[in-house]
Image (tube, rainbow, N blue to C red):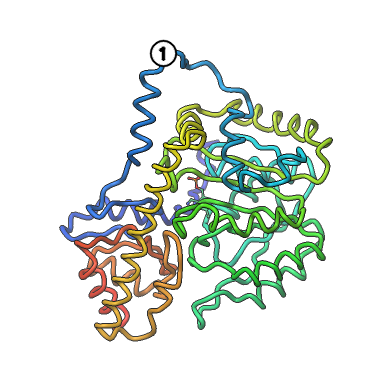
Amino acid sequence: RFAEVQMAPPIEVFAVSKAFTDSTHEKKVNLSVGAYRTDDSKPWVLPVVRKVEKMLAEDDSLNHEYFPILGLEAFSTAASKILLGDSHPAFGEGRVTSVQTLSGTGGLRVAADFLHGVLKYTSVYYSSPTWGNHRLIFQLAGFTNLCTYRYWDAEKRGLNIEGMLEDLSKAPENSVVILHACAHNPTGVDPTQDQWKRIADLIESRKLFPLFDSAYQGFASGDLDHDAWAVRYFADRGFEMMGTQSFSKNFGLYNERIGNLVLMLKDPSCIPAVRSQLTLLVRGCYSNPPCHGARIVTKVLTDPALFEEWKECIRTMSGRIKEMRKGLRERLEKLGTPGTWDHITAQIGMFSFTGMTAAQAKHLADKYHIFLLSSGRINMCGITTGNIDYVAEAIHDAVSN
Ligand code: PMP
């Protein structure tokens, strides 16, 4: 039987990272996978995370018993509060419930399983382009109508709001619409507040179901509240909706798989039944979540001094990214690289959608050992003060040829 198995297509981002690892070129640069790097090109354990890990290691009251199926409640509550804002009335009204998940991906999968298996939704809309995993998650959860809505305007190098609204206006009722809460991956372009209002109007009038994917809160602007504006706006309008949170990037806890699924309902009396169905889904999938990341995040979010330290770490990361954006744009403009480069600083978050073609990306890999996705997306964190001149000159060469 195994002889019948066909080779699945490679996952591009991991294939490109492997090409980087395999390269022996001394100036090689990895601009592919979305992970923060310091200015020395090193992964960063946030000092506040290290501090809490030491506290946890010393705490003899902790053990390795199973977590509850839906995770640590103190974690989920604290996480939901940074998404919706501490004092959001929905908490007082008892209309919010949340579940610890295996990071953002796991949250999206539990959401998709619930939306399909329990609410019987079959149709999902995601932006074109979007993070490479959205389609796969919903497809594996059983969604059969997997559709894109227009998002990126290649000519303007910005948001195609009219195309987005037109496509969503044709979506069948009860379609799920995946929205990036902030720092859209891969384009780095978010709707303005006025555009969000138009999107919300349409979602409401067409009876669509909003699902916010929040993978970069704090990373985009350096400010947690600012980056949650869109989610809170929808919440204020009283939508029934879901939000998934990832603590991979803003806590640097990539491999701890710590995330949260937040559900906002109109009627609090539905919550026990909803939680009972979520319990079954999780029980039959992975039974219960891991504890390490949940303990770290809970401690930081519930201790005012640690919370301030964390916010400082976020500002360090987002600040370095902004510096690199500015530096890259300045260099390309100085070199006279064909095209305009203001989008590099206009875009926000970890990624920049450079506008480079697949051929130009290949040229960068072949000639300069600079590795990026064929879509032209680059991870700004891969750029450092040590390699920024090399990267700019290589891009100049690739674009000029
Ligand atoms: N959504 C988006 C848009 C992302 O970019 C990512 C991370 N690449 C995720 C969700 C989930 O990542 P994780 O599972 O590590 O939380």
Badge 1: residue crowd in 10 Å (few <14, some 14–19, many ≥20): few
The answer to whether 18 is drawn above or below residue 194 in the figure is above
Res 195 quadrant in image: bottom right
Q: How many marks?
A: 1
Point out residue 59 in the picture as x, y percentages from the top left corner.
Answer: 40, 17
Measured as percent of width and height from the top left, residue 174 is found at: 80, 56
Amino acid under disc 1: Asp
Q: Name the residue rendered at 58%, 57% in the picture.
A: 181
In the displayed structure, does residue 400 sit left or right of residue 279?
left
The residue under the point 40% across, 23% down is: 56
In the image, taking residue 69 as reference, residue 209 lies left or right, namely right
Q: Is residue 183 left or right of residue 389?
A: right
Which percent across, then down, holds residue 200?
72, 64
Q: Please name the residue shown 60% across and 42% down the image.
A: 81
Residue furthest out toward the top: 60
* Residue 394 in the image: above or below residue 5: below
The residue shown at (52%, 40%) is: 103
Q: Nearer the viewer, residue 307 or 5?
A: 307
Front-most of residues 267 and 130 = 267
Q: Position of residue 115 (x, y in %)?
A: 73, 45
**Residue under pointer 1:** 60
* Image quarter of the C terminus: bottom left
Task: Report which quarter residue 177 is drawn in.
Answer: bottom right
**The image quarter in which residue 194 lies:** bottom right
Quadrant where the N terminus lies?
top right
Q: Nearer the viewer, residue 168 or 191?
A: 191
